[in-house]
Amino acid sequence: MKTKALVLKTKKRIFGALLGRNLSKFKGNGLDFREFREYNYGEDSKKIDWKVSAKINKPLVKEYDEERELRIIIAVLKSGTLFFGSKRLKTELIAEIIASLGLAALEEDNKIQLVFLGKNKKIFKPTKNKKSVYSFVNYTLKTDYLQEDYTQSDIDFLNSFKKSLLFIIGDFFKPVELRNLKHETYVISVRDKFEESPQFSGYTEIVDPVSLNSVNVYFNKSSINRLQKHIKRLDAKIALQCKKSKIPFTKIYTDEEPIYKLIKLVR
């Protein structure tokens, strides 16, 4: 039920169409040029090649064998830390992001592929089927994240895919190297505000979501400040790397509606 409700909620977003139009700007006009032909009344005049037309005094348009297809990959970096949230789980936020990107891309007749990277990879086949969004969301909500983690080799693995428009989603609590990716890459960091500013003090049992080991940690103002500084350093590194590599980057929190930041990301 949650899967259907989330997809329907996303469909109702009036800005979804705007996101789709922003994605469509990456689509080319064709793969293989075949020939020139005379312009037919009523066609889009933007297709006219004015330089060639001027030489023979006739409006001509380029004819292509096929329209260039935009291929989109959404890659989720699986980690135990994603199974957390004070308002809602980060995994639920990721499901909504996937639904937003997926529906927008498929509405523009683009091919989309979902990939989960970590100890247990899951690679969905590229598709143009709008019903696949339900499968994407359902898997995102139901798959197990505890004891999961990703490595740099998972990031490098993305280069084995055909060059695409790539969205990488994760919480980025450990450094990764993105500059060698061949794709046109976009990075989406998902966080819960409680992670960056925990509101408790005294002894607290902390469970490592990767190893499942637990430890009692004493929290006070000083230890929370150290934690915040550590997270800020990690965030600064990924933001600087993206800036140097001209990779668009955004951070979305669990108490936010993702659509607005997604539109801004691909603008």
Image: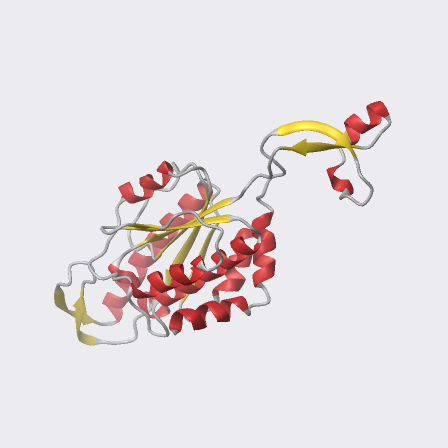
Q: Kindly identify the residue that appears in the image at 48 percent across and 56 percent down.
A: 102
Q: Is residue 161 visible?
A: yes
Q: Is residue 267 visible?
A: no
Q: Kindly identify the residue that appears in the image at 37 percent across and 42 percent down.
A: 178
Residue 176 locus on image (x, y percent): 32, 45
Q: Is 40 situated left or right of 3 in this image? A: right
Q: Kindly identify the residue that appears in the image at 27 percent across and 41 percent down.
A: 153
Residue 239 locus on image (x, y percent): 42, 50
Residue 6 locus on image (x, y percent): 44, 70
Against 93, residue 70 (above or below) is: above
Residue 104 locus on image (x, y percent): 54, 57
Q: Is 233 situated left or right of 166 in this image? A: left
* Front position in the image: 258 or 115: 115
Q: Kindly identify the residue that appears in the image at 52 percent across and 54 percent down.
A: 106
* Front position in the image: 256 or 158: 158
Against 265, residue 214 (above or below) is: below
Q: Residue furthest top?
A: 55
Rendering quarter of residue 15: bottom right
Against 247, residue 142 (above or below) is: below
Q: Residue furthest right?
A: 57
Q: How many marks?
A: 0
